Each structure stands twice: as C-alpha cells, then as structure tokens.
C-alpha cells in the first residue's frame, strides 16, 4: 500500500495474498461451528523458519503456530476469492482478519504471538495422533535442523550435516506415511498435524 493514502479497506487483497491468519483461542468458536476445519489449517512448528510480518524477514518462530493454509503451493489464504477479491467466510473470519487494517497496523501487531493456539488445544485428549505428533517432534526437531544448517557455515560442504538433514527429511516423510497408511489419518489433515514437509522447508533454506 506504499504511496497510497487510505483509511479503509479497498479490497485489494494484498493482506490475503500474504498468507492466512494465525489462530487465537477466540477462533475456537468458528472451528467448533465448522466454518474452519483441520483441512483448512497448517501448523508452523517451533523453530521453523517463517516470515515475520513485524520484522519483515524470515526467521525461526519462537512458538508453535496454527494458521489458515494457502492455496496449492502459494501462501494466498485458502478462503480468498481471487475473482471477486473477497473472503468466502467473511462473516465468520478469524480474529486477525477482523483486526487487519493495513493503514493502521499497531492493533494487529500488538496481537501477534498472544493467546495463540497450538495443535493440542483443538485435538481431543487421548487421540492416538497426539503420540505420533510427539514422536515427530522428538525425531524431526527444528532445533536439530537449525544446528545442522548452522554447521554448514555457508559453504554447504559439511557432508555429515547434509547426510543428517537428508535422514531427517526421510524420517519426516516416513512418519507422515505411517499416520496416513496405518492410522487412517485423512491426507487433508497432514499439514495441520505435521506442518510443512521438512524437505520443502529445507529446499528454501539450502
């Protein structure tokens, strides 16, 4: 919106194309009502590199976040209607969308990182997928990924570190396959349960 003097939404769609909103506890109501579903969500795991809208840079997130996923391989919000430049769930949109004002950002910025939900907040206690998620976090942690990436020292020639990253990416895929094939996890829920596949995240980091 640089160079434009506006004081209300002109439905340009810029904010929607930058990515879906992070969910807060207040948004559990629209989840319970069915306006949002697990298949609409993606988890950004703790330590995963992601775009920080305040600092306007990609950096590891400090806590797990659940947000509305994008369309296809893009971050454009799942609910953004390109043809009409509108939101398909406007009357039931999440909190961050209701507070979004590109011409007056302090209110939304003050909300970032506060009272956000994690996956366990919206999965039934006792669901066996929780144990698989815990195993995934132990065996494919972003803390280890970050340490391995740091050890490459910019030249990418640390073969041991590269081999370990490749092993972690394979393990990440194996756990996903186990959950889908053996536990019956709906494939549409994969990005919510496990976040983005590690090999895709690494592809943009190496």
Image (spheres, rainbow, N blue to C red):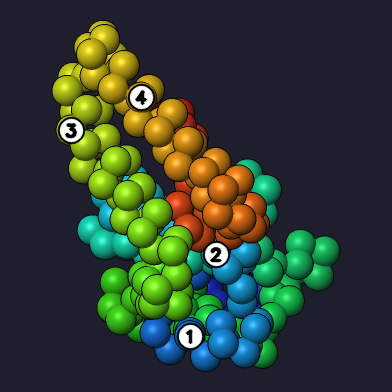
Query: Which of the two labelled residues, at mark 1 and mark 4, occupies the earlier sequence position?
Result: 1
| Relative depth, front residue between 184 and 45 | 184
Q: Is tag 4's residue or tag 3's residue first in the polypeptide sequence?
A: 3
Q: Looking at the rendered structure, which numbered label has been put on residue 41?
A: 2
Q: Is residue 125 above or below residue 76?
A: below
Quickly name the residue at label 1.
28
Q: Nearer the viewer, residue 38 or 126?
A: 126
Say which residue label 3 marks: 147
Identify the residue position indicated by label 4 in the image: 167
Q: Are marks 1 and 4 in contact (CB under 8 Å)?
A: no
Please indicate, yes or no, whether residue 20 appears anywhere in the rendered image: no
**SS type, badge 4:** helix
The disc, 1 or 2, on the residue closer to the chain's N-terminal end is 1
Q: Badge 4 local density, few (<14 within 10 Å), some, or many (20+)?
A: few
- Circle 4 or circle 3, nearest the eye: 4
- Going from N to C along the chain, the mark reached first, 4 or 2, is 2
Q: Nearer the viewer, residue 35 or 119?
A: 119
Circles 3 and 2: CB atoms closer than 8 Å: no
Q: Position of residue 156 (x, y in %)?
A: 28, 14
Going from the N terminus, do you reach mark 3 or mark 2 first?
Answer: 2
């Amino acid at each position: 919106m640089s160079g434009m003097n506006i004081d209300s939404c002109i439905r340009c769609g810029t904010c929607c194309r930058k990515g879906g909103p992070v969910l807060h506890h207040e948004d559990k109501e629209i989840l319970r009502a069915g306006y949002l579903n697990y298949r609409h969500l993606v988890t950004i795991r703790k330590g995963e590199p992601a775009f920080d809208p305040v600092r306007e840079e990609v950096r590891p997130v400090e806590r797990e976040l659940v947000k509305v996923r994008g369309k296809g391989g893009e971050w454009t919000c799942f609910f953004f209607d390109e043809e009409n430049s509108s939101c398909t769930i406007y009357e039931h949109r999440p909190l961050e969308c209701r507070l979004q004002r590109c011409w007056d950002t302090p209110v939304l910025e003050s909300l970032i990182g506060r009272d956000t939900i994690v996956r366990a907040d919206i999965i039934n206690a006792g669901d066996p997928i929780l144990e698989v998620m815990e195993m995934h976090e132990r065996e494919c942690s972003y803390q280890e990924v970050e340490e391995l990436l740091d050890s490459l020292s910019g030249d990418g020639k640390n073969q041991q570190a590269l081999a370990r990253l490749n092993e972690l990416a394979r393990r990440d895929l194996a756990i996903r396959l186990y959950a889908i094939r053996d536990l019956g996890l709906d494939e549409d829920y994969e990005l919510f349960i496990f976040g983005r596949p590690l090999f895709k995240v690494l592809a943009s980091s190496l």
